[in-house]
Image (cartoon, rainbow, N blue to C red):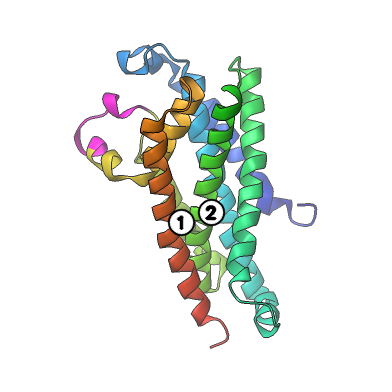
Amino acid sequence: MRRMPSVFVPSLLMPLFILVATAGAFRGIGALPAFEGSSYLAFTIPMATVMGGGFAGINAGMTLARDMEGGFVDRLVASPSPRVALVLGPALAAMARSSFTTTIIFIAGLIGGVGLPGVMGTLVVYLVAAAFSVATACWAMGVALRTGTVQATPLMQVAVFVSIFFSVAYAPREAQDGWLRNISDVNPVTYLLEASRDAELTGVAISSLAPAILAAAGLIALLGAFALLGLRRLGT
């Protein structure tokens, strides 16, 4: 963080910017019946924490790509350490970064008048963001391992942005229709956001938590395989 703040600071500031800008610009739609009188700031907090997890994952891919360009990864490959550590290490780092960002988002919410959702609710919000950070870290590292350059960062970012914005990021599914509702229904991020949002607004609900666990497990398994298969390209 001290040596290269540009790697860490954007992943912290961007979710805060999204939280403030979204809650300020769209707070009026919180009056819709689908929101059931909930504060739109409270409604937006889970989206900001999930986005923070996504940025933490992107940073894992960016860092790996930068290390590949600088030759550091070549030295790691030549060491007796297992290659899988090249994926597991950054994934764990992404989880730590996402937890820090989630804490900052919660503090911003407290400043805005939104209290913490209780012990279990707070834990679920942290875990959902951490799970998404691991999934996006695997995606970003898979891209980095295949391209070997930090110039692939836009490709890492666009997939994360699309997955979040084409979900229930700004409105619940009950308030959506047409093509956006159809995409939201099959988007795994929708189920992550719904579990985190229930925990934030009304309390932990098994009806939303169970689908979120399945969605997170599926994303991590699929994207984890994508990253691990990319390891085969190292040293060849």
Residue drawn at x 39%, y 29% is 170
Residue drawn at x 46%, y 24% is 43
Q: Is residue 169 left or right of residue 179?
A: right
Expressed as whole percent of the image width and height from the top left, the position of residue 196 reads: 47, 33
Give yes or no for residue 210 being in the magenta stretch. no
**Label at residue 35:** none
In the rendered image, which residue does mark 1 sit on?
Answer: 220
Q: Is residue 121 above or below residue 29?
A: below
Expressed as whole percent of the image width and height from the top left, the position of residue 87 reads: 58, 66
Please, which residue is most extreme toward the right here?
2
Q: Quadrant of residue 167?
A: top left
Q: Which residues are magenta?
A: 171-181
Tell me the crowding category of disc 1: few under 14, some 14 to 19, or many 20 or more residues within 10 angstroms, Cα based.
many
Question: Could you say whether the residue bearing mark 2 is in a helix, strand or loop?
Answer: helix
In the rendered image, which residue does mark 2 sit on?
Answer: 134
Q: Quadrant of residue 121?
A: top right
Please, which residue is most extreme toward the left here?
178
Q: Looking at the image, tell me whether mark 1 or mark 2 is earlier in sequence order.
A: 2
CB atoms of marks 1 and 2 within 8 Å? yes
Question: Does residue 169 appear anywhere in the picture?
Answer: no
Magenta highlight: main SS: helix
Identify which amino acid the numbered label 2 is placed on.
Answer: Val
Decide which of 17, 57 is in the foreground and name it: 57
Decide which of 175, 202 is in the foreground and name it: 202
Decide which of 162, 100 is in the foreground and name it: 100
Identify which amino acid the numbered label 1 is placed on.
Answer: Ile
- The span from disc 1 to disc 2 (Cα, nearest Å) is 7 Å
Q: Quadrant of residue 4?
A: bottom right
Image label count: 2
Give yes or no for residue 172 being in the magenta stretch. yes
Question: Does residue 8 appear anywhere in the picture?
Answer: yes
Residue drawn at x 58%, y 17% is 114
